[in-house]
Image (spheres, rainbow, N blue to C red):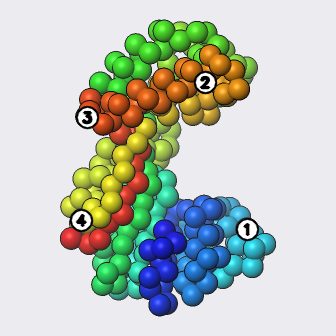
Amino acid sequence: MRSQVSQFALAALLAVMTVTSAPVRATPRHVPQAATLCMDINPDLLQLGRERAGAEGLAVEFAEADLNTIDLPSGAFDVVFCHAALHHVIELERLTREIARTLRPGGVLLTVDVVTRNGYLMWPETREMVAAIWKALPAKFRVNHTVYAAPLIDDQIWESDTSTAGMECARSEAILPAIDERFEAMHYVPYFSLSRRFFDTMYGPSYDLTAPLDKAVFDWIWEMDVHHLATGKLRPETFFGMYRPA
């Protein structure tokens, strides 16, 4: 992102729902001529962002906004950066239209996000593969560290529809179609076809990569992930993309 922003003499960066993100703070640190505005609906996160930026002496502005209803100024920004933001948005088509409109000529959208089924559910082919791997795992790798009052072993991998209790992945299936409707991909990097299901905060603490078995299992699952992405057998659950308006 630094190289993309630095190509503009007086770059204007809009960061949405990424106010505490390290890449956002890196931009004014390494590209001090960039005018950076961070938006989020959460006032507590905005305050945390202000504190972190202030502690580093960074020139960053912060504003409270709802991405579902926001009206962005036309031709105001050279770069719009969304880090793990779009999967919290319901009005994706409206937001991508606003982002396309607010970009200056030559401007780009940079985004990293989750593109699972809605509700952070697995695609059927992913669930089938994950279930097969799960059955083969020793019990120590099936310990759930987040759902229960104390860590417990799961006979089946935990899967719950997160959209029923909030905005998490409410329309994650629609993220890529919404972007593709308004933008042309300059760079698209898919990753995590299945490994995040094993290595996230729920089960990840079970792995000690200094232990031979743990490292071997970790490496095998990762290689399976890469293989199934490369062959198209499984869809990505996460992606990085750099886009320009179509």
Q: Position of residue 185 (x, y in %)?
A: 27, 62
Residue under pointer 1: 52
Residue drawn where x is 37% and y is 58% of the image: 241
Q: Earlier in the sequence, mark 2 or mark 3?
A: 2
Q: Tell me the number on the disc at residue 215.
A: 2
**Most extreme residue toward the right, as rendered?**
55
Residue drawn where x is 61% and y is 9% of the image: 139
Name the amino acid, label 1: Arg
Residue drawn where x is 33% and y is 35% of the image: 229
Judge from the rendering whether residue 118 lies leftward or rightward of residue 218; answer left or right: left
The span from disc 1 to disc 4 (Cα, nearest Å) is: 34 Å
Q: Tell me the number on the disc at residue 184.
A: 4
- Element type where label 1 sits in the image: helix
The image shows residue 84, relative to residue 242, as above or below, that is above
Between circles 4 and 3, the one closer to the viewer is 3
The image shows residue 147, relative to residue 90, as above or below, that is above
Judge from the rendering whether residue 41 lies leftward or rightward of residue 96; answer left or right: right
- Element type where label 3 sits in the image: loop
Judge from the rendering whether residue 206 lies leftward or rightward of residue 13; answer left or right: right
